[in-house]
Amino acid sequence: MARFLVLARANWSAPWPTDPSEELKMEKRYYEAAEEAMKKGEIEDIGFFADGQSGFMIVKGEATDVYRILLENPYYDYEIHEIIPLAKAKEIEIAVLEDMVKAANK
């Protein structure tokens, strides 16, 4: 199962509520949805940065799963990066370099 690092930044051009009570309802709804996704194992971690307008998620699944999750919240702009685990990156890099050494020695 793939893992993705999702960086999120507030999209100030989105139609944010101007009434604090409506914003409170919206934020509670999003926190509940995030907690539910974490319970289901779709989201591994969520955190916020000290600037108060950005943060991150670690999402597990396929790219289409990430897409579905992010469509649910249009109030943020996202930057998505698939995570390659250390063991897999090492395996791939060593194999590529070994092939390059073999090719250079021919």
Image (cartoon, rainbow, N blue to C red):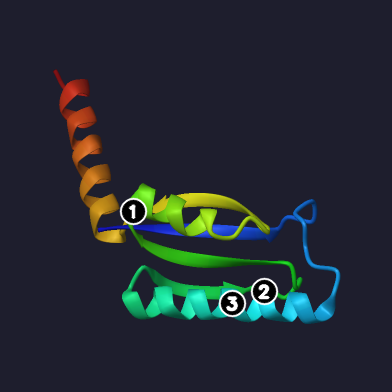
Q: Amino acid at mark 2?
A: Met
Instruction: Check disc 2 and report the residue beneath it.
Output: 26
Q: Residues within 10 Å of mark 2 (few under 14, many from 20)?
A: some
Q: Position of residue 58 (x, y in %)?
A: 44, 66
The circle drawn on residue 29 is 3
Residue 84 or residue 28, whichever sits in front: 28
Give the label on residue 84, or none.
1
Query: Element type at marker 1?
Result: loop
The answer to whether the residue labelled 3 contacts the one labelled 2, judged by CB atoms less than 8 Å apart, is yes
The residue that appears at 75% across and 54% down in the rendered structure is: 14
Give me the C-alpha separation between circle 1 and circle 2: 34 Å
Q: Is residue 31 above or below residue 74?
A: below
Mark 3 belongs to which amino acid? Answer: Arg
Q: How far across and down, in percent of the image, does residue 23 sit?
A: 75, 75
The residue type indicated by label 1 comes to Ile
For marks 1 and 3, give the CA distance: 32 Å
The extreme right residue here reads 18
